[in-house]
Each structure stands twice: as C-alpha cells, then as structure tokens.
Image: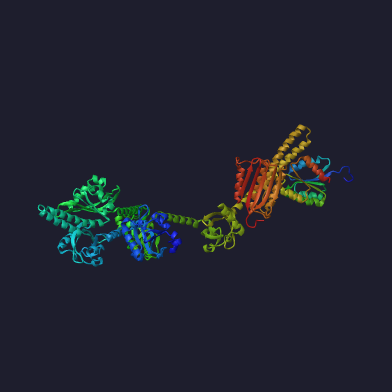
C-alpha cells in the first residue's frame, strides 16, 4: 500500500498530522508519514516493523484489540463509521504518554497477491498534548469542577434551600436508575427512605447552619427507580451564598454494596459470637464468606482508577491497595501491604506526628480530611486530597481505617499559576504610574488602583461608594457619557478625552481618560476599563504658555514700531500690528495676504533679495528703507528683520520705525557739520597754507641770494620742514573739502580720489579698476561716506603700510557694490588687532548699512573691502 | 622800446591775492634781467583791468582769489593776448581746481612749494614760446 493509492502522495509527506495506516489483520503499521515520526518518535523504518498497538497505552489495549477485531470481521466500528474525532492518550517511543486527537477511517479493501481481501484502518493523528495542557491551565475552576462532577463515580447534586433539586450529575442514573433530567425540579424528600427522612432533615439543617465549605456527613437510603433501596453516603456543603453555585451541594456515593458487606460481616460476627465456642468449624466458613464479601468490595474499589483507596489496620499497617493507589503512589500492592502507611507521608509530616493524628481524628470524629503533600515510591511529592474513615465491625470494634485520596497536583499547579498570574496582574495594576479602574456599567468604581486614590484624593472606601459621574466636572460629563454610550453601542472600541475630576478637597484636577469596554463571551457589556493620567502639570504649562503668548501679543499690539510677519516662501503678509497699520494707512484685513512688495517702496527683486538674505543670516538691519502708504506716499523707515522657523514654514518678523524726523534732524546736523568743515578748510587753505607757501618761497628767495653754502644748506632744511608741514596741511584741507559730492557718480568720486592720492604720493603706484555693471548714478550720502572710508584706507596704505602698489577696484557682487583697496604693504597678522582707525571705520560702515571686511597678513599686505548694498534703481 | 631787439625780455603778469607772496614773487621776478613784471593784481577784477591794458607773454596765476577763481581769468587773458602762457601756481593742488584749470587752458600747474628756480624756469619756458 502506498500513499499514492490513497490519493495523498504529496500531502502524506507534508501534512502536519500523522497519517498512519495499519493492517487490520496483523495490526502491523504499513504507512507512516514524517509527521507521525515527529509525534511518536519512531522512524519510518522502525514504525513499519511495529504493531500499531504499541502506540496504545497498556490500559487501553484490550479495547483497541476488540475494536480492531470487530473492524476486521465486519468492516465496521463506531468510530470508523462515525469518523468521530477521538481524544485519547497515546505512547511515544520514549514511553511518555501524550494526548492525541485521532480520526479513524476505512480504506477501500485492497486485494493482495493471494487475492485475499485485506482491510486497513487509516488514522489521522494530531498531538494535542500542548493544547490540552494549555486548555487545562486556562479553564475556569468551575469548569474543572464541572468536569470532575460529570465524570465522577460520585453523585453530585445541587439543591436549593428547600431541597428542590437544581442539578444532579449523570452518574445518578447508574446508581438510582433515574435520568438526571427527571430529577431536576423534584424534591429530595421524594426519594429518601421514610425511616431516614428525619435523620436526613437533621443533616440538612446541620449543613444549612454552616454556610461555606464545611462538609457535613450525610448518610441515607434512597429509592431506586425500580423500587429497591440504595445506601448513599456522602457530604453536604452549604454553598447557597456562593455566587457561582448558589445551592446546597451534595456529594453522594453508593455504598449499598459495602453496607451489605458490612451488614453481612456484622451478622456473621453475631453468629460467631453466639456459636464461637461450639461451632469453631463454622468460623472458617464465615471467614471465607467475609473474604468473598471483601473481594466484592475490593472489585468495586479497584475499579476506581483515579482514587487511591486502601485500608490500614488500627496500627496504621497497610492491609490492601487498589489500582488507583498503585497508580498514584507508585507502590505495587505486594510492595506495600504490611508496611506502615506512614511511608506515604513526607518526613516533616512524620516528624510532626501527622500520620498518627490523622488516624486519631478519624477514630474520634468518624472522619479526617487528608489534604496534604504525599510521597510517591520514587520519593517525588504530589498534592493529595482525600479523607480517612474508621472501619468498624458490627460490634463497633475498630478494624482499621479506609483511606481515599486523589492526586490534585495538577489542579493545585493550575490554581497556583492562576494565582500567580492574578498577583502579577494585581501588582501591575496597583503599581501603575497611571490610574487604572474597572467601572460597572452604571459608572460605579469596581476596582481601583492606588494611583487613582492619589489623583482623586479619595480614600479607597469612599471612592468605591461613588460613580465616575459623581466626581466628573459637570462641564465634561456630557461628552464623557456620550462616548461611554458609543462604547456600549459598539460604535467605538475605545475613546480618549481630557476632562476634569473634582477632588475630595473640592479642587479640580485635569486628567486624560482612555476608556474601553470589556464584554462577556456572549457579547454583553461586562464592565468599563478606564486608564486615567494626571495631566494637571501639562495643563498648567499650557496655561502659562497661553498667558505668555497674550503678554507677548500685548507688547506687539502696543508697540510704537510697526511690526508684521511675512511668509518668506509666499512673500505674503501674515500679521500686522496697529502701529504698522497706522503708519501705512491700511486696515488689518487689507494687509493680510498682501504681497510684501506692495508695502515696500523698492523693486520686488530687491525686496525678495533682502528676504533671502534675512533667512540666510537670521537677522538683518536696514538703516533706510522706503515703505509705501496706502495713499502712495513713501515713509522713510529703518527695518529690523529676523527669521523665525515654524517647522515647514519660514516666517520673517520685521519691525519698522518711522525715521522721517530723525532723517530731518540728521540732515540738519550734517549741513551744519559740512558748513563747519568747509569753513575750516577755507581758513586753513586761505590762511595757513598760503602763509606756509609764502614762508617756503620767502626762504627760497633768501637762499637764492645767499652766498654762503652753509647758510644755503640751513635754509634748505627750513624749506623742507615748511614744505612737509604744508603738504600735510594740504591733505587735511583736501579731505575736508570733499563736500557736496552726494550728487556725483560714485565711480567718478573714487576716480578723483585716486587721482588726488596719486598727486600726493608720487612714489606709490595706484591702479584703479571699475568692473561691469557698476552704476553710473550717484549713491547719495552713502556714496560720500563710502568714499571717505576709501580715502581712509588709501591714507593708511600710503602712510602706515609703506605700500609700493595700491589697487583700487569697484565691482558688483549680486546686488552689492564692492569697493576694495588692496596694498602690498607690511600688513598685520591676527595678533595685531585692528586699531582704533579700523574699528572706527567699521562703525562708520555699519552706520550706512555696509559691511567692512578687512583681510591682512604680515608681509602680504592688507585688503579692505566695503560691501555696499544697492537699493532700488541703483544696479547697473 | 621799439627798435630794441637785443634781448627781448619776457613780459610777465602776476595774479596773487596773498600780499606777502605777491611781493616776494615781485622781488624775485624783477630781480631777473630777462623778465619784466609788467603788472600785478590781487583780485579778479584788478587782473581783468590789467589784461585789457597790458601786453604780456606769461601770466602767473593763483587759483583762489577773494572775488573768484583764478582759472576763470584764462579766457580773458587769451582774448587780449592769444599767445599768452598760463602758469597756475597753487597752494592746495585741489584736484577739482586743477582739472578745471587744465580744461580752461592752463599750460602748467605748479605747486607754490616748488623750488623757485623751477618756477622761474617754467616762466621762461612759457614766456619765450
């Protein structure tokens, strides 16, 4: 048989489920895929040597064989026919037990070589050990309880306070013949033996008086559906107050057989008592009878696999041992019978006398709970739950103790895990840096962490008496409730809002709330989860910022300077202050969105070049600028502009100040100064210089008339001194005479400057170079001032630097006119900081809005560069 | 003076408003045997009078005069004496003034601080041209 024959060739290799085909006749495995190896651990070659039975745990092999035999004979079987998904234990190669999910199916009979029809069974198996473990861990304890109840040999019954049956486990049918559905709704009293009714009512009353898990032993005879009486023994717990159960819980076990056995023992003993002396021989018979009854009892006991059930004699020695005990404790019957039962106890329990105490309690009280850690044969520990009861003969003599125990390690572990997980959750919840709360659908606080008490100022008990509506600021409540409604309606999954709580002390706290809803598995809303963050500090900061903004705004609004913001990219005005609007005669709305060159009385090209420069340099001051009023007239202003980066947008904030008055005053001052300068120049020229010239000439005449050589030399020396004085004075006069040149083209002014300097310093070569685009129009006062600065640079080069060559040049650099004086003189290094002359030159350059750059290096000379920004109409 | 052609003396006129300088130049020029200082003036008006009255070969002219600019006289001198040489003797060497004087026809511009021999040499050169 090949996978291909099943039409699953490729799938067979790749599928994650084990695919196993076994021969129904021999039990041999004939197909085994890689997934099967993965699950069971056997390689393909190993598996093909095996009987499929080896995968079945020992305890299920009988059933396996029976099922396989039936299928072999009839080609049918309940699982094969139904293809029901089976949940079974299975054995791995390692011997370990795993849980599998398996579906069985038939395969079309295949005729082999001998023309004999052979049947095969196909099993598709999935390892669900992991899943089972996970499911086990996650299942609610109630479900586990329920499962236990459902599968228990015991009858578990829940009644209300009046004894009306609310639930009874299906096992009741096996014991009493009633189907559990028949019994639900009927009264327990209907089934109790009339003679036991009073006792049963007493036991019930006893249980009812002790709410919670306080087991009360109950014992009663109950009518079987077919009329016989069954003896039930068990415990009752009053769990009426338990929200999960809400009833009286009875745990009954059918002890009819044991009772009968005991009864027989009792009657036999009676007989023994009566006849012991004369009928010793019958003792044997009676003992045999006893043994046979015990045998029956034993059968019953041994069938209980999940329970360890064994007896010890009054001294604690083990008398018998069922299969469940073997499975749970690991001892075989022959190993333990005759040993002290205390070997099942942990050393610490033995030291504390627990084994003796347990038996003592059972003897005195008729029952002792055994809920403790026990030892297995291999020394490992497990958690066991059970009880010990005394066994007495009919005469009431103690014959020993019956002990029943169940391994609840797994349940304990699961409970521990759940508890740990719960604790972790609680710790996280309690220590969270934000407030976390569960709220009922009515807004009541159900569960609240510590942080929330801190935020609201309410102590726990007080807060838990309130609803969120109680402490929410009335202005914020509407929006909150609306969003909660949307959560409940399923319109939103979560919401977040900023709102205010009123703290216990009456103060307000700003919080950020994130709300969500937890629903029951059925989809019904269960409760709200709220995460609450205290944002008071942030709110305070926002408030402070807003106040600072309004203060700042007030400053801008009240400023006497005109202030506006302009979008540097679009060149459009964003904001203006009242002073600007007054200055230009526009309304705020007229200016908003207006292009910048609409208010600046210069070429757009020049306006945007300034914008660019401000962006590049961050800050810019323009000493003189014309701004155009709405009526077309121009107002003279000075401008301070700075670039502000608003993320993507670059904005320029400019403050402008009307300088009409200042200019007028400056003009007047300048006129006075120039007149003064002219007067001094004239006085020096017409008086002192003429006198000096005369003096030199007069001495020259004397010298011509002198005969004596020595006198001639002396006179020559005087003449030279006078000449030097006169030359110096002449330069001063010439400097003072630069006047009224505002109207001369700048290049022409510089050319005459160069000529004059050539005249005054014949031994220096002064070159002059005028570049393209240098404007031929006058520069006004800036031109006059700039030419004075150049004169100063030339004087420095001639007098102080001892230059041989000086080159003067004018050229354009973008919108700037560059005037440069470069010499080959001594220069100065960085160690020689520019002197007073240079710093005063810088200041004077700044006054006319120019930059002065000075480069100097020792032995290489000095270069003085004046950058003159040209405005409207001045570019060449 | 007609018929005397042994050595023709250079006729010079001096226009100078600084009295001491003018006196000094007068002494200097008169002390030269080949130079005849025919007229002296201390102002524009005075110089114009002389220009119409006298004949001369060379005029020594100061630029700054109390009633005007010396260079403005050049045209007047040329009207009466078309071949007259014009020597500007200036203390300031003001470039604007020099430029203007050159444009208006000055033949030479000299610094008042120049050695007297150079001044005399220039007077002779211009006067005998």
Image x and y of residue A314, in percent: 18, 49
Query: What's the image's color scheme?
Result: rainbow
Check the image and report above or below for A850 versus A241.
Answer: above
* Front residue (pair A623, A375): A375
Quadrant into which the C terminus of chain A falls = bottom right
Q: Residue furthest right?
A: B3
Residue at 83% from the left image edge and 40% from the top image edge: B33
Rendering quarter of residue A448: bottom left
Image x and y of residue A54, in percent: 35, 56
Q: Tell me, yes or no, if residue A662 can be seen here.
A: no
Residue A833 left/right relative to A380: right
Rendering quarter of residue A19: bottom left
Residue A393 left/right relative to A632: left
Image x and y of residue B119, in percent: 78, 42
* Front residue (pair A373, A643): A373
Quadrant into which the N terminus of chain A falls = bottom left
Image x and y of residue A354, in percent: 22, 47
């Amino acid at each position: 048989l090949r996978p291909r024959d099943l039409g699953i060739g490729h799938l067979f290799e790749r599928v994650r489920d084990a695919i196993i085909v076994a021969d129904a006749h021999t039990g041999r495995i004939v197909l085994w895929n890689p997934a099967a190896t993965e699950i069971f651990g056997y390689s393909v070659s190993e598996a093909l040597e095996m009987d499929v039975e080896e995968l079945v745990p020992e305890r299920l092999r009988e059933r396996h064989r029976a099922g396989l035999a039936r299928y072999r004979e009839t080609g049918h079987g309940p699982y094969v026919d139904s293809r029901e998904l089976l949940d079974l234990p299975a054995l791995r190669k390692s011997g370990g037990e795993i849980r599998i999910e398996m579906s069985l199916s038939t395969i079309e009979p295949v005729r082999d070589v001998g023309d004999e029809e052979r049947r095969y069974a196909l099993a598709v198996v999935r390892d669900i050990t992991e899943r089972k473990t996970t499911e086990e861990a996650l299942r609610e304890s109630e479900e586990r309880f329920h499962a236990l109840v459902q599968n228990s040999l015991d009858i578990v019954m829940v009644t209300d306070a009046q004894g009306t049956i609310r639930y009874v486990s299906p096992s009741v049918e096996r014991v009493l013949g009633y189907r559990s559905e028949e019994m639900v709704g009927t009264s327990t009293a209907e089934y109790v033996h009339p003679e036991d009714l009073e006792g049963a009512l007493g036991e019930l009353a006893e249980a009812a008086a002790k709410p919670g898990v306080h087991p009360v032993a109950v014992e009663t005879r109950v009518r079987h559906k077919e009329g016989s009486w069954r003896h039930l023994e068990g415990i009752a717990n009053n769990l009426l107050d338990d929200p999960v159960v809400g009833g009286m819980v009875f745990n009954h076990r059918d002890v009819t057989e044991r009772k009968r056995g005991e009864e027989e023992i009792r009657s036999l003993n009676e007989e023994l008592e009566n006849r012991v002396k004369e009928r010793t021989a019958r003792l044997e018979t009676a003992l045999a009878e006893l043994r046979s009854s015990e045998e029956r009892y034993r059968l019953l006991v041994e069938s209980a696999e999940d329970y360890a059930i064994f007896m010890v004699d009054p001294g604690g020695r083990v008398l018998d041992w069922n299969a469940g005990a073997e499975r749970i404790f690991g001892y075989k019957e022959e190993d333990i019978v005759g040993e002290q039962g205390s070997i099942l106890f942990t050393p610490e329990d033995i030291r504390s006398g627990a084994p003796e105490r347990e038996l003592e309690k059972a003897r005195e009280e008729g029952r002792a709970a055994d809920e403790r850690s026990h030892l297995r044969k291999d020394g490992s520990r497990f958690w066991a739950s059970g009880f010990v009861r005394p066994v007495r003969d009919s005469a009431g003599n103690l014959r020993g103790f019956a002990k029943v125990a169940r391994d609840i390690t797994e349940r304990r572990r699961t409970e521990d895990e759940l508890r740990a997980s719960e604790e972790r959750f609680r710790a996280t919840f309690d220590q969270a840096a934000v407030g976390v709360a569960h709220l009922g659908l009515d807004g009541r606080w159900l569960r609240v962490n510590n942080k929330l008490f801190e935020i609201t100022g309410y102590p726990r008990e007080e807060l838990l008496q309130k609803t969120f509506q109680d402490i929410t600021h009335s202005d914020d409540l509407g929006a909150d409730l609306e969003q909660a409604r949307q959560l409940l309606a399923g319109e939103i999954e979560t919401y977040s809002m900023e709102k205010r709580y009123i703290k216990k002390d009456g103060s307000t706290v700003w919080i950020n709330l994130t709300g969500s809803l937890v629903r029951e598995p059925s989809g019904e809303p269960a409760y709200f989860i709220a995460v609450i963050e205290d944002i008071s500090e942030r709110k305070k900061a926002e408030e402070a910022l807003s106040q600072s903004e309004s203060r700042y705004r007030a400053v801008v609004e009240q400023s006497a300077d005109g202030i506006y913001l302009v979008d540097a990219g679009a060149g459009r005005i964003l904001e203006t202050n009242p002073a600007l609007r007054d200055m230009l005669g526009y309304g705020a709305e007229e200016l908003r969105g207006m292009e910048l060159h609409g208010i600046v009385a210069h070429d757009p090209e020049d306006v945007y070049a300034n914008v660019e420069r401000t962006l590049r340099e961050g800050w810019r001051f323009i000493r003189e600028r014309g701004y155009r009023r709405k009526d077309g007239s121009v107002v003279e202003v000075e401008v301070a502009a700075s670039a502000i980066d608003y993320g993507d947008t670059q904005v320029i904030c400019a403050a402008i100040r009307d300088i009409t008055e200042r200019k007028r005053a400056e003009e007047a001052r300048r006129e006075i100064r120039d007149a003064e300068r002219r007067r001094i120049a004239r006085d020096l020229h017409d008086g002192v210089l003429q006198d000096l010239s005369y003096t030199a000439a007069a001495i020259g005449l004397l010298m011509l008339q002198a005969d004596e050589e020595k006198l001639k030399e002396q006179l020559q020396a005087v003449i030279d001194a006078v000449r030097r004085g006169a030359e110096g004075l002449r330069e001063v006069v010439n400097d003072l005479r630069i006047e009224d040149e505002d109207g001369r083209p700048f290049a022409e002014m510089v050319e005459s400057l160069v000529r004059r300097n050539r005249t005054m310093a014949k031994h220096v070569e002064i070159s002059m170079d005028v570049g393209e685009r240098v404007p031929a129009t006058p520069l006004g006062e800036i031109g006059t001032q700039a030419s004075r600065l150049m004169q100063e640079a030339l004087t420095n080069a001639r007098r102080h630097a001892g230059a041989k060559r000086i080159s003067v040049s004018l050229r354009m650099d973008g919108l700037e006119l560059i005037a440069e004086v470069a010499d080959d003189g001594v220069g100065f290094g960085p160690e020689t900081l520019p002197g007073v002359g240079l710093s005063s030159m810088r200041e004077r350059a700044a006054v006319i809005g120019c930059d002065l750059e000075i480069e100097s290096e020792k032995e290489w000379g000095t270069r003085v560069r004046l950058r003159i920004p040209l405005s409207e109409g001045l570019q060449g | 003076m007609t018929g005397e052609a042994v050595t023709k003396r250079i006729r010079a006129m001096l226009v100078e408003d600084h009295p001491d300088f003018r006196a000094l130049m007068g002494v200097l020029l008169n002390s030269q045997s080949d130079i005849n200082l025919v007229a002296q003036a201390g102002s524009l008006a005075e110089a114009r009078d002389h220009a119409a009255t006298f004949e001369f070969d060379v005029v020594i002219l100061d630029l700054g005069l109390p009633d005007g600019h010396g260079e403005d006289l050049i045209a007047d001198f040329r009207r009466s004496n078309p071949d007259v040489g014009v020597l500007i003797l200036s203390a300031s060497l003001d470039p604007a003034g020099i430029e203007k004087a050159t444009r208006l026809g000055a033949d030479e511009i000299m610094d008042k601080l120049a050695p007297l021999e150079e001044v005399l040499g220039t007077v002779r050169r211009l006067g005998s041209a």
